Image: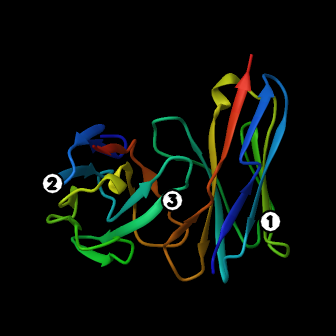
Amino acid sequence: KNQVEQSPQSLIILEGKNCTLQCNYTVSPFSNLRWYKQDTGRGPVSLTIMTFSENTKSNGRYTATLDADTKQSSLHITASQLSDSASYICVVTASGTYKYIFGTGTRLKVLA
Amino acid sequence: GAGVSQTPSNKVTEKGKYVELRCDPISGHTALYWYRQSLGQGPEFLIYFQGTGAADDSGLPNDRFFAVRPEGSVSTLKIQRTERGDSAVYLCASSLRTGTTDTQYFGPGTRLTVL
């Protein structure tokens, strides 16, 4: 069964600190992996997309990595800000399909 | 508009009632998706439209749920005889076309509460 698992489930850090969120997937055949940010009460917003051949992608203070061999991805947030408080969702798409397979997300809280 | 919009933002109804949720996709996007998101969970696929037709409705939980997109733009998700278990946030997304690398852009969602 195609699954996407994320860890930790929730995380609290102080403003200015770095953090790394993890995503493991069993989706096969793999097409691409996205990280979305979802603020409370809002729809998810795309941060990065990586295909099989890409192993890192940056978007400002967000850097995503992908290891297609171990089927793992991480999202690293540098110098966190209060506005980074949100849920971060890992989404994987299988080759030949449009369907998004969502992880359950990591809830990040950044404290002043 | 610039993004996907959904109305209403919140809907409270009583068990057994009928509700309609509306989605306005990004102009020019041919693909439209409906998802349901329960508290603390990732979105769950319901139905996908390519143009006016429902290309995949395999995620609809039962025949109380129905969605239309008559002119290939605005879509309405319809729920009959609502049950308390239908309470969730209903998200709509659109993408330019169907394709595994096309990013889906999400609306803010409609929070449905069935009392």
Q: CA distance from mark 1 to mark 2?
A: 43 Å
- Seen at 26% across and 49% down, the residue is B24
In this orientation, does residue A21 appear? Answer: yes
Residue tagged 3: B103
- Residue B65, given in percent of the width and then of the height, sits at 25, 66
Task: Point out which mark residue A72 bears.
Answer: 1
Return the disc, 3 or 2, that comes first in the chain's sequence. 2
- Seen at 56% across and 47% down, the residue is B40
- Seen at 63% across and 77% down, the residue is A2
Circle 2: residue type: Tyr
Circles 1 and 3: CB atoms closer than 8 Å: no
- In which chain is the residue bearing label 3? B
Circle 1: residue type: Gln
Left or right position of A10 against B24: right
Element class at badge 2? loop
Element class at badge 1? strand
Depth check, mark 1 against mark 3: the one in front is 1
- Residue B104, given in percent of the width and then of the height, sits at 47, 58
Residue tagged 2: B18
Q: From the viewer's perspective, is residue A39 above or below residue A16? A: below
> Which corner quadrant holds the C terminus of chain A?
top right
Tell me the colour scheme of the image: rainbow
Q: From the viewer's perspective, is residue A40 above or below residue A53? A: above
Alpha-carbon neighbours of circle 1 within 10 Å: few (<14), some, or many (≥20)? some
Q: CA distance from mark 1 to mark 3?
A: 21 Å
Circle 3: residue type: Thr
